[in-house]
Image (cartoon, grey):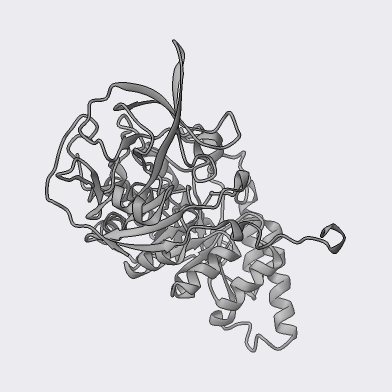
C-alpha cells in the first residue's frame, strides 16, 4: 500500500482537461477525483500517479473507487427515481471481472452479469449472492450450465441448444433424486429468454448485437415456438425476457424502441400461459473516450427507458415488471486509467514521430481490434505546452501495435509517465501474454490510499501451465 495526499490544487494547464460538464462519470475523460497537484503531477483518488508507478511498476492499471461507486449509485438511484416498480442494476462484469470490482459493485447493491463459468466463480468468490447473478453467453457448455443450476443463479437462455440442454440436465438431476418436487418453482431452473430485437444502432460492427444478423439470441420469427416450448417444460421457470442492442451507443431512440418492444414480448408470452415478471433491457450506454464524444448521462439514459416501460405496461394493462439493466463500460471505463513509462522514440521526417511505451496491445487490444481511440496526458508534465503530435506505439513485435495516433503531447523524454484515459473497461479483461509479456498489476485508489487488486505477473507465471515432455528435457 502507498499513500499520497492531494494538495487541493486544481490546474487547467495545457494538457489538463476542461472543467467537468457533469457528475456523470461516463461523460468525463478522467476519473472524478482527478487533480493536478502542486508539483504539476496528475493525481487520482488522492494518489500521485508517478508515485504509484514507482511503487507498483508499469504498465499499471489504476481504478478510482469513488468514480466507480458514483456510477453504480447514479444507475441505482435513477431507476428508483423514475421507475415505480422494482428494479435491479447488474454490472456487466465482462468489462472488468475480478474479486475487488465485483465486491465494490455488490456493496453498492448491484447484481452481476457473467458470461462464463470463470466469471461466475469470481462473482461468487467475491460474495455476490447467486440470486443477483445472471449468466449470459451464446454457447455455454454443459458443465457451465450445470454449475449455474447447482449454485442457483439465473440463466439467460440464448438459443435452442441451451434450452434443450437445460431440460436434459434437469431431467438427469430429477432421475437422480435431486429434484423432489419439479412443480416447486424454487427448485426449477430460473431462466430469462434472450431475444434478438432487430434494432440497429450506430456503433462498431463487432459490438452491435441487436440487429438480426447477430450470433446472440432467438430470432424474432421464433418467438411463438420458443414461448410454446418453454411453457411446456415443468423443469424451467421462465421469469422474463432479455435483449441487448450493442455497446458504446450515444443514440437514445433505439433504447426507447427496445423498451416498447419488450413489453410486447411480455404480452405475447402471456398468451402461452407464461407470466413474465422481469424485463432486462441490457446496457450499451457509451462513454467519452475523446473530447468530441458526447454520450447521454446515466440519468438521461435511464429516464426514457423507465417512462416507455411504464407507458407501455399501462396501455397493455400489465403490472410493472422488475426492470433490469446491465451496464458495463459506462460503469467502469472512466473510473480506470493505464499508466505507462515512455521509452524509445523514432522521428520519420515529414511523416510521423513514434513514441513507444512499455505496454501496448497485450494490455489494451481495443485499438488494434476495434480501431478504438483514446486520449492521453503526460502525468509528470501536466501544465507543459502541447508541442508534439506523436503516435503512441506499444512494445510488441507487431506493426499494428499502436495505442493512439496523432496524440497531442508536450515534449516527452524517456522515463516520462504517459496516462491513457478510459481504460477501465475491456483492457484488463481482454489482456493477453502476447510476446510473453506478463500482464500488468492493478490498484484501486481512494482517499490517498492505493491497494493492490491484481498482482503483476512474473516470468515464472508465464510458464506455470507449460508442460515439457520427458523426451524434450535435456
Relative side of 214 to 311, left or right: right
Q: Quadrant of the C terminus?
A: bottom right
Q: Quadrant of residue 271?
A: bottom right
Name the residue: 69% across, 57% down: 160
Judge whether 246 appears above or below 440 on screen. above
Q: Quadrant of residue 384?
A: top left
Name the residue: 28% across, 54% down: 67
Residue 322 visible, this angle? no
Residue 463 visible, this angle? yes
Residue 298 position within the rendered picture, expressed as x and y whole percent measured from the top left: 30, 48
Q: Nearer the viewer, residue 352 or 165?
A: 352
Residue 133 position within the rendered picture, expressed as x and y whole percent measured from the top left: 48, 68
Name the residue: 53% across, 37% down: 395
Name the residue: 23% across, 47% down: 34
Q: Nearer the viewer, residue 52 or 376?
A: 52
Residue 14 position within the rendered picture, expressed as x and y whole percent measured from the top left: 21, 29
Relative side of 381 to 347, left or right: left
Q: Which residue is farthest left?
A: 8
Relative side of 445 to 338, left or right: left
Relative side of 191 to 28, left or right: right
Q: Which residue is farthest front?
A: 474
Q: Which residue is farthest top?
A: 350
Q: Quadrant of the N terminus?
A: bottom left
Q: Nearer the viewer, residue 164 or 432?
A: 432
Judge whether 61 appears above or below 373 on screen. below
Q: Nearer the viewer, residue 466 or 69?
A: 466
Amino acid at each position: 500500500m502507498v499513500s499520497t495526499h492531494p494538495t487541493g490544487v486544481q490546474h487547467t494547464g495545457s494538457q489538463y482537461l476542461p472543467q467537468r460538464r457533469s457528475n456523470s462519470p461516463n461523460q468525463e475523460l478522467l476519473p472524478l477525483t482527478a487533480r493536478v497537484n502542486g508539483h504539476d503531477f496528475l493525481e487520482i483518488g488522492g494518489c500521485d500517479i508517478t508515485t504509484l508507478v514507482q511503487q507498483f511498476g508499469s504498465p499499471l492499471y489504476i481504478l478510482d473507487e469513488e468514480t466507480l461507486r458514483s456510477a453504480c449509485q447514479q444507475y441505482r438511484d435513477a431507476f428508483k427515481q423514475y421507475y415505480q416498480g422494482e428494479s435491479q442494476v447488474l454490472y456487466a462484469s465482462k468489462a472488468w471481472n475480478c474479486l475487488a470490482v465485483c465486491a465494490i459493485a455488490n456493496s453498492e447493491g448491484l447484481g452481476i452479469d457473467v458470461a462464463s463459468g470463470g466469471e461466475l466463480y469470481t462473482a461468487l468468490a467475491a460474495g455476490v449472492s447467486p440470486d443477483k447473478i445472471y449468466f449470459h453467453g451464446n454457447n455455454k457448455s454443459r458443465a457451465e450450465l450445470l454449475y449455474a443450476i447447482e449454485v442457483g443463479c439465473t440463466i439467460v437462455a440464448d438459443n435452442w441448444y441451451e434450452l434443450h440442454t437445460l431440460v436434459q440436465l434437469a431431467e438427469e438431476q430429477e432421475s437422480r433424486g435431486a429434484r423432489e418436487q419439479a412443480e416447486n418453482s424454487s427448485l426449477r431452473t430460473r431462466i430469462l429468454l434472450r431475444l434478438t430485437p432487430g434494432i440497429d444502432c450506430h456503433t462498431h460492427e463487432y459490438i452491435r448485437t441487436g440487429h438480426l444478423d447477430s450470433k446472440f439470441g432467438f430470432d424474432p420469427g421464433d418467438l411463438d415456438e420458443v414461448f410454446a416450448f418453454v411453457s411446456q417444460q415443468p423443469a424451467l421457470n421462465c421469469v422474463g425476457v432479455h435483449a441487448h442492442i450493442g455497446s458504446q451507443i450515444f443514440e437514445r431512440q433505439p433504447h426507447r424502441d427496445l423498451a416498447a418492444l419488450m413489453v410486447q414480448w411480455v404480452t405475447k408470452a402471456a398468451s402461452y400461459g407464461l407470466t413474465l415478471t422481469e424485463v432486462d433491457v441490457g446496457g450499451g450506454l457509451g462513454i467519452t473516450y475523446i473530447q468530441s464524444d458526447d454520450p447521454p448521462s446515466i440519468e438521461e439514459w435511464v429516464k426514457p427507458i423507465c417512462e416507455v416501460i411504464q407507458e407501455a405496461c399501462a396501455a397493455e394493462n400489465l403490472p410493472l415488471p422488475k426492470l433490469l439493466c446491465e451496464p458495463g463500460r459506462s460503469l467502469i471505463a472512466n473510473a480506470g486509467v493505464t499508466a505507462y513509462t515512455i521509452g524509445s522514440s523514432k522521428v520519420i521526417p515529414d511523416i510521423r514521430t513514434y513514441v513507444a511505451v512499455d505496454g501496448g496491445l497485450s494490455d489494451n487490444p481495443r485499438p488494434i481490434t476495434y480501431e478504438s481511440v483514446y486520449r492521453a496526458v503526460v502525468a509528470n508534465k501536466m501544465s507543459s505546452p502541447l508541442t508534439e503530435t506523436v503516435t503512441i506505439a506499444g512494445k510488441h513485435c507487431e506493426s499494428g501495435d499502436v495505442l493512439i495516433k496523432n496524440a497531442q503531447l508536450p515534449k516527452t523524454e524517456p522515463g516520462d509517465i504517459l496516462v491513457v484515459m478510459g481504460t477501465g473497461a475491456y483492457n484488463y479483461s481482454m489482456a493477453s501474454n502476447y510476446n510473453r509479456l506478463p500482464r500488468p498489476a492493478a490498484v484501486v485508489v481512494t482517499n490517498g490510499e492505493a491497494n493492490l487488486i491484481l498482482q503483476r505477473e512474473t516470468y515464472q507465471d508465464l510458464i506455470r501451465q507449460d508442460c515439457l515432455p520427458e523426451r524434450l528435457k535435456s
